[in-house]
Each structure stands twice: as C-alpha cells, then as structure tokens.
Image (cartoon, rainbow, N blue to C red):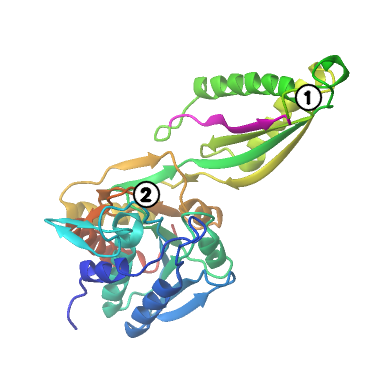
C-alpha cells in the first residue's frame, strides 16, 4: 500500500468549509468535514462512530483496534475553524509558497488533524497491541461540546492533542473561570441620592478589592512554565439613566487559574472577597454566578507518554523539542479532567484567527512521523500515562 501523504490530505480538509456556526451565522459547521473524515477512516479500516447530540454539530471517533492488551492512546483534534471574513485570498484553497501551506485551518488545526489521520492509518499497518482512538471533534473554538460529548462515551490510557505548538511539547496550560457579580441597590432620584443605594458606588469597592487580589496573585509563587494566575474585569454595566441612582450593576470577571487551583476554589475566593465587603459596607448586596469554568492542565513530566513522544520528536527533528506552557486553555484540559493523562504536540506555522493562516509541509510530515513512532511504542503492554 502506498504511503499516505498528510499534505495531500490537508489539501482536501482545507477545501471543506467547517467554520464554527456559533462564531458567525454563515458558518457551515462540521457536518461535511465530519462525513469526509468518517468515510476516510472507514476506507482505512477504522471502526467509526459519529456522535451528534447537538444536531448539525457532529464529532467523529475512529478506533483502530489493537491485537491484545496494550495501552490505549487517544489522538484529539478539532474540525471547526474560525470565520473567513477578511481572509486574504481563497480561504478554502491550500496555497503553497515554498514550504508554507496557506489556507484557513492549516495551522489551527487541520494540519494536526491530517497528521493524526495519516499517522494512525500508517501505524495500523503493523497493528499495535493497544487501541488507538482518533477523536475529531466539533466546537473547540467556542464551547467544546464535541470533546465533552466524546468523553462521555470514550476513554483511553493517555492522550495527545495536536493543537499547533510549533513542534514543541506543551505540558501545561492555564485554566479559566468566568463569573458575573450582580450588585443590587435601591433606585432613587438623582437629586436625592441619599434615599437610594447606589450599586455603581458599590462597584467601585469591588474593583478596588479585585485590584488587591490581582496584586496578591502576582506577588505569590508562580508556576515555572505559566507564571502567575490572574484576575481581571472584562465587562461592567450599571444604571438606567443620568437622573436615577443605579439599582443594579453587573461586573463580569475572568479568573485565569494555575494547576492546583480549581473552579470551586476560585469561586470561594471571590465569594469571600465579596462577603468581606458586605460586612464592612452598609446595604452592600451581591450575587455571584459562575458562568463557565475549565481546569488547568499539568502533565506529569515523567509519564511514559511524555518520554516516548519526546524521544520520537528528538529522533525526527534532530534536536530535543522544548517543553513549554501556554497561557490559554485547550480541550486538553477537559481530557485531563476526565482522568486521561494528556499533553499537546502540533505543527509549526502562524496566523491562527488571522487574515493569513499557514503551516509548513515539513512540520505536518514531521508530526505524522512522530505520531507513528509514538503509537507503535506507547500502545504496548505497560503502565498507563
């Protein structure tokens, strides 16, 4: 059987509109690209499952069954891309400029998807002992509903997420939590403010307290790869008109978390901060609502998968890949929270969410080779991770 060229596969993936419809009303969604990947995996001997709890937002799981009791490995990539409005050129055509491959999704992250598919099918020609699960998911760019749906049914001993990492190992990233603070006051005419309770005035106390919290976070111990956790106000709204004391003020807060911090712990931190204000300030009334929260990622640097992936990356690249952390969040956080040891390795390039997005053919092919070797060495009998 001839070798699989991941660049040719990437060309076919880029040609399919898979813009996330939650980011723009014109987004086509993942239906067509999920069908393409399902049919491709079927032709290459995978056991294929299509998951679609949310109509029109399918994810596809392809399982390459092993021969025995080896370790199982999950390879995760997302099928959705960001909008193409303002893109320079035809976003759905792979344009080669030397080693650079331009087109929407080449970098984030259809280059990684192409490498996952090509690597797993190639490794499957010498069937590994353990199962390999290819999870190609919807909606990573907005709500991560695809990976959440996959994890309700499927698991593995370890996982690699092929988000773009410039061929470096990402072994940690921050988590995040979004909260809304609602301050409740009492409306009154602006000429007689003493008759009311000004929710905006109370908001100034909250802002000062959050500034103090930000200072404590930045002065505390940092993570060697991620630095310090942060807190910031992202939105604020209050009042109805110029002549009325505001009876409500809403403050949106973003809290970026380090490994070891949890959504529950940072919610308790904010609740304590607000409760202390309520004890000091007359008529200070608040409600704290958690909106979205995702835990941070921290891979065990001595885990078998980390060691094996690093060995094969060094062999293919001719130099040991760096290990780094990322300030942003990825679906790897969900996978790790489900009890599956996880890290990230992906292609080189630039332009994610920009008007000109590109990866390199050499990095797509290198990632494919690294994943082939990793599958063959990891999916044998042994301890998980």
Q: Report the residue at 43% width, 38% height from top.
A: 327
Left or right: where 199 falls relative to 308: right
Residue position marked by numbered label 1 in the rendering: 244
Give residue 353's mark. 2
Q: Residue 108 location in percent, x, y? A: 35, 55
Left or right: where 158 falls relative to 123: right
Which quadrant is the N terminus positioned in?
bottom left
Left or right: where 130 falls relative to 12: right
Mark in the foreground, 1 or 2: 1
Residue 68 is at least partly visible in this image: no
**CA separation, marks 1 and 2?**
42 Å
Q: Quadrant of residue 282?
A: top right
Mark 2: secondary structure = loop
239 in the magenta segment: yes
User: Which badge, 1 or 2, comes first in the chain's sequence?
Assistant: 1
Whether 175 is drawn above or below 17: the answer is: above
59 or 381, nearer to the observer? 59
Whether 331 is drawn above or below 267: the answer is: below
Mark 1: secondary structure = loop
* Region of the chain picked out in magenta, as a range: 227-240
Q: Report the residue at 50% width, 51% height from top.
A: 333
Left or right: where 141 falls relative to 324: right
Q: Report the residue at 28% width, 71% height from top.
A: 12
Q: Main secondary structure of the magenta part?
A: strand
120 or 35, nearer to the observer? 35
Residue 41 is at least partly visible in this image: yes
């Amino acid at each position: 059987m001839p070798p699989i060229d991941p660049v040719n596969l990437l060309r076919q993936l880029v040609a399919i509109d898979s813009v996330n419809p939650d980011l723009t009303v014109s987004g086509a969604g993942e239906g067509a690209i999920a069908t393409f990947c399902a049919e491709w995996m079927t032709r290459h001997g995978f056991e294929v499952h299509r998951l679609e709890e949310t109509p029109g937002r399918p994810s596809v799981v392809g399982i390459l069954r092993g021969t025995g009791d080896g370790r199982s490995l999950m390879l995760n990539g997302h099928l959705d891309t960001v909008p193409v409005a303002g893109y320079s050129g035809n976003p759905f055509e792979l344009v080669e400029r030397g080693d650079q491959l331009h087109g929407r999704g080449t970098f984030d992250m259809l280059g990684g998807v192409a490498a996952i598919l090509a690597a797993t099918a190639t490794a499957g020609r010498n069937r590994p002992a353990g199962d390999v699960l290819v999870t190609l998911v919807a909606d990573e760019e907005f709500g991560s509903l695809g990976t959440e749906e996959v994890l309700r049914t499927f698991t593995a001993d370890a996982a690699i997420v092929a988000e773009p990492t410039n061929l470096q190992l990402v072994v940690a990233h921050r988590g995040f939590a979004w909260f809304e603070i609602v301050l409740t006051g009492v409306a009154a005419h602006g000429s007689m403010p003493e008759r009311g309770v000004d929710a905006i005035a109370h908001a100034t106390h909250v802002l000062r307290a959050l500034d103090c919290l930000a200072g404590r976070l930045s002065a505390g111990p940092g993570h060697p790869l991620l630095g310090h956790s942060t807190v910031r106000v992202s939105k604020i709204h209050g009042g109805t008109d110029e002549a009325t004391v505001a009876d409500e003020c809403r403050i949106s807060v973003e809290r970026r978390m380090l490994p070891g911090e949890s959504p529950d712990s940072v919610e308790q931190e904010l609740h304590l901060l607000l409760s202390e204000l309520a004890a000091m300030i007359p008529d200070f009334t608040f409600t704290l609502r958690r909106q979205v929260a995702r835990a941070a990622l921290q891979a065990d640097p001595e885990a078998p998968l980390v060691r094996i992936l690093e060995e094969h990356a060094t062999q293919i690249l001719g130099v040991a890949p760096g290990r780094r952390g990322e300030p942003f969040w990825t679906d790897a956080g969900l996978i790790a929270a489900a009890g599956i040891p996880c890290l990230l390795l992906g292609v080189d390039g630039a332009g994610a969410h920009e008007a000109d997005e590109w990866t390199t053919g050499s990095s797509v092919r290198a990632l494919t080779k690294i994943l082939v070797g990793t599958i063959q060495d990891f999916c044998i009998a042994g301890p998980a991770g």
